Amino acid sequence: QVQLVESGGGLVQPGGSLRLSCAASGRILSIGAMAWYRQVPGKQRDLVATITPGGGTNYADSVKGRFTISRDNAKNTVYLQMNSLTPEDTAVYYCNADVRELGSLSRLYWGQGTQVTVSS
């Protein structure tokens, strides 16, 4: 069974920075695209950023120029560097990954989520 474990969330003041990490573990043969989403209570889960195995990235307009997604393929880990945070960035952040397990087809896995709160 593959698991995605997120870390790095917390409370930060407006204008501050946080770095989220999401590490995949299990019987992993390969990982395709990885992504970060965020969700606030009562709203849908929104895409924040994606990254391909080769490093190609895509961002939501609301985070362009402030957030940077990256990955370490050797560690099966994806990161989200968040700068110039505003209260509107407050949400639970989730990672996902398209994982191919040994002896199986690819499927999408999600992490458990990590809370990011931007407040003074």
Image (cartoon, grey):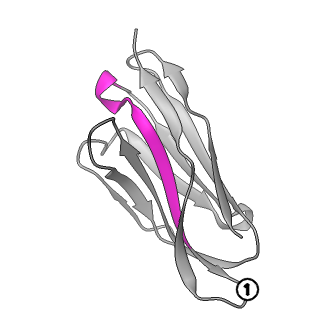
Res 72 quadrant in image: bottom right
User: How far from the left and from the top, in percent, is residue 12?
Assistant: 49, 19
Say which residue appears at 39% left-offset and 34% top-offset. 91
User: How far from the left and from the top, in percent, is residue 83?
Assistant: 43, 32
Q: Nearer the viewer, residue 44 or 9?
A: 44
Instruction: Give the magenta range.
Output: 86-98
Say which residue appears at 57% left-offset and 53% top-offset. 111
Q: Residue furthest top?
A: 120
Say which residue appears at 50% left-offset and 32% top-offset. 115
User: How far from the left and from the top, in percent, is residue 49?
Assistant: 39, 55
Q: Residue furthest right?
A: 27
Mark 1 highlights which residue?
102
Is 50 placed above or below 18 here?
below
Is 40 placed above or below 101 here?
above
- Secondary structure at badge 1 equals loop
Q: Quadrant of the C terminus?
A: top left
Q: Residue furthest left?
A: 61
Say which residue appears at 28% left-offset and 48% top-offset. 44
Res 104 quadrant in image: bottom right
Majority secondary structure of magenta residues: strand
User: How far from the left and from the top, in percent, is residue 52?
Assistant: 47, 71
Is 100 placed above or below 36 here?
below
Which residue type carries mark 1? Answer: Leu
Q: Is residue 50 left or right of residue 26?
A: left
Queried whether the magenta region covers residue 24, the answer comes back as no
Q: Quadrant of the N terminus?
A: bottom right
* Label total for image: 1
